[in-house]
Image: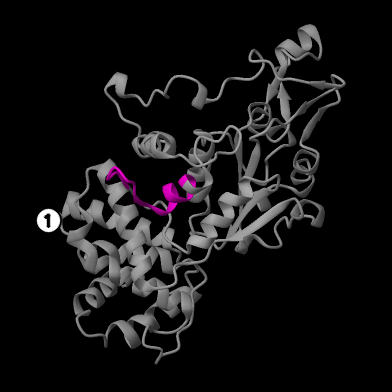
Amino acid sequence: MSVTVEPTSVTPSRSDSAPANTGDEQGMQALRPHAEDAYAAELAALAAQDDRPRPVRWKLSPWAVATYLLGGTLPDGTVITPKYVGPRRIVEVAVTTLATDRALLLLGVPGTAKTWVSEHLAAAVSGDSTLLVQGTAGTPEEAIRYGWNYARLLAHGPSRDALVPSPVMRAMAEGMTARVEELTRIPADVQDTLITILSEKTLPIPELGQEVQAVRGFNLIATANDRDRGVNDLSSALRRRFNTVVLPLPETPEAEVDIVSRRVDQIGRSLDLPSVPDGVDEIRRVVTVFRELRDGVTSDGRTKLKSPSGTLSTAEAISVVTNGLALAAHFGDGVLRAGDVAAGILGAVVRDPAADRVIWQEYLETVVRERDGWKDFYRACREVSA
């Protein structure tokens, strides 16, 4: 027996209701607004000028979704800021996948913007990025399927009123995009609850002898990282239900510096930190150090290096620079300097106190010490490493 989820049993999505209360009414501002709130003006401008065909229940056409992520200038002069800096084809494949009946798996090493891309895709497609399941080793089956209001269950027995829908169930009923973060961290038996949902587009409710059928517009974005292989690998049956898109690390130092600068500038504005242009030289140094240790070779290709145990991802570089800006703002002159980022770099590189510290000291003495124009950086790193 197929059923339709009634409005009384599923909370309406944010895209179909009043705008979220970000706290402005109480004199407060959200520290980190959802993508659909932070970029509401850009999404509205795209929707107003988007004359291309849109899949059922999509807020934008696939072309407009890709433009939202990659950036561009609209005919009326509206500038759409890039949300993802990388190969255009990757974004196009991801968006096209969501327009089909196959789910999307964003795969890559930690810090390659998988969660960021997932959120912005959901915001642009459905206008709501909050239908989210966070994967952990303790994620229960109910987080993907449904749970129960036990007070009502005990009082009246199994009923639709006692059922608590999961984000995935809500997305199916409303034709929205659901998100599952860190899919490979979820236990294998819980992962496999997605098989019927993704293949049959139904969610059985055996306790009631009913099922929820997905309506057009429903799809799912999952993320997983390469370092989790062997934790809870996807079964072949589940993997077949996904179209996998691998998000790579930035190809060039310039691209990575641009990514770090953009994100730090966005974060800094929300925290009232100094502007990024004043510290672009230090950002370039941080990116250089991370790339060289990550790649195991200096940028000129002349010196082989040992790589530490950490990932040294772009996301970690953003964190190091943001923390450095906070130090510069509150305990310095407001300009990002070597001393502001040195401690953050040390914390990112030395994860294993024994092995990584040796690698870091060797890098300082053989590479940083001899590099022209890096004397202040060398001294700052030596000071925090002592």
Residue 11, image quadrant: top right
Q: Which residue of the protein is positioned furthest toward the left in this rendering? A: 333
Whole-percent x, y for residue 89 in the image: 53, 62
Label 1 crowd (10 A; few <14 / some 14-19 / many >=20): few
256 or 48, which is in the foreground? 48
Can I make out residue 64 in this image? yes
Q: Which residue of the protein is positioned furthest toward the top in this rendering? A: 155
Residue 262, image quadrant: bottom left
Whole-percent x, y for residue 355 in the image: 50, 76
Whole-percent x, y for residue 58 in the image: 55, 36
Kindly identify the residue that appears in the image at 24 percent across and 61 percent down: 340
Kindly identify the residue that appears in the image at 42 percent across and 24 percent down: 20
Whole-percent x, y for residue 39 in the image: 37, 39
192 or 309, which is in the foreground? 192
Measured along the vertical axis of the image, is residue 56 above or below residue 289? above
315 or 9, which is in the foreground? 9
Can I make out residue 135 in this image? no
Tell me the quadrant of the picture where the N terminus can be found. top right
Q: Mark 1 highlights which residue?
A: 333
Over which residues does the magenta segment extend? 64-79
268 left or right of 125?
A: left
Q: Amino acid at mark 1?
A: Asp
221 left or right of 37?
A: right
User: Does 70 appear in magenta?
Assistant: yes
